[in-house]
Amino acid sequence: MINIKSLIYLLIILVIIGLLYSCYHYRVKDKNENFKTNKVYEIPNQLTSHTAKALVLSCMDFRLIDDEVYYFNKIGYTNNYDKFVLAGASLGYNQTSFPEWKQSFNKHIELAIQLHQIDEIIVLEHMGCGAYKILYNNNSLSKDEEFKLHKLNANKFKQYINSKFPTLKVSALIMDLNGSVIQL
Ligand SMILES: [Zn+2]
């Protein structure tokens, strides 16, 4: 039979586990702390809004989907951007093995302008990208090498979009696997 003392111990253990779990959860949710701002952004009404600020191009990688949404919410883009995915983000656009990837994205830029009057393209790269290993045929890219290639591709992407769609603002970001983001 369980006595009162063991029951109290059990309750204490459960409370400690609960506290540890909520601390962990809070840390994970708050890992983009550097983007915290006191600014209050207006969130478009999903039922009535017809315009969006931007079209975001990012990689397909499943690991960063929540971090991307979290990041864009933090910087005030909640429900205010169209989304397009190409493996490798800017590299997916620049590469020539699959020319239809670039054509498809260009067409979606035109649609995003026509349908939602976007005035900005944001390309979001990420570190540890499998597309870089495959498309550069190099399984052992160092972090430095990979970063330089992201920068190279993002710049090429920016130049191309600037010349093809001169009215659009273009910016490039890169996310680390812990969800933190810097400008490229
Ligand atoms: Zn990737």
Image (cartoon, grey):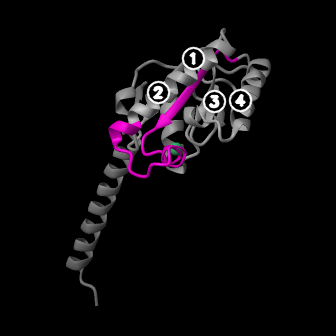
Q: In the rendered structure, which disc, 3 or 2, sits on the residue that comes first in sequence?
A: 3
Q: Which residue is denoted by mark 4 in the rendering? A: 46
Q: In the rendered image, which quarter is residue 116 located in?
A: top right
Task: Give coordinates of residue 100: x percent, y percent.
Answer: 74, 37
Q: Nearer the viewer, mark 1 or mark 3?
A: 1
Q: Nearer the viewer, residue 178 or 36?
A: 178
Task: Give coordinates of residue 130: x percent, y percent.
Answer: 50, 49
Q: In the rendered structure, which disc, 1 or 3, sits on the residue that comes first in sequence?
A: 3
Left or right of residue 23, residue 124 in this image: right
Q: In the displayed image of the protein, which residue is found farthest to the bottom?
A: 1
Mark 3–mark 2 Cα distance, whole angstroms, equals 30 Å
Q: Which of marks 4 and 1 is in front?
A: 1
> What segment is highlighted magenta in the picture?
118-146
Q: In the rendered structure, which disc, 3 or 4, sits on the residue that comes first in sequence?
A: 4
Cβ–Cβ under 8 Å for marks 3 and 4 = yes
Q: What SS does tag 3 mark?
A: loop
Examine the rendered structure and indicate whether residue 9 appears above or below residue 38. below
Q: Which residue is denoted by mark 1 in the rendering? A: 159
Q: Which residue is drawn at 68% across and 18% down?
A: 118
Q: Residue at x 62, y 32 (%)?
A: 93
Q: Nearer the viewer, residue 123 or 70?
A: 123
Q: What residue type is labelled 3?
A: Asn
Q: Which of marks 3 and 2 is in front?
A: 2
Q: Residue 152 carries which label?
A: 2
Mark 1–mark 3 Cα distance, whole angstroms, equals 27 Å
Q: Residue 79 carries which label?
A: 3
Task: Give coordinates of residue 164: x percent, y percent.
Answer: 68, 15
Mark 2–mark 1 Cα distance, whole angstroms, equals 11 Å
Q: In the displayed image of the protein, which residue is found farthest to the top?
A: 167
Examine the rendered structure and indicate whether residue 51 appears above or below residue 140. above
Cβ–Cβ under 8 Å for marks 1 and 3 = no
Q: Nearer the viewer, mark 3 or mark 4?
A: 3
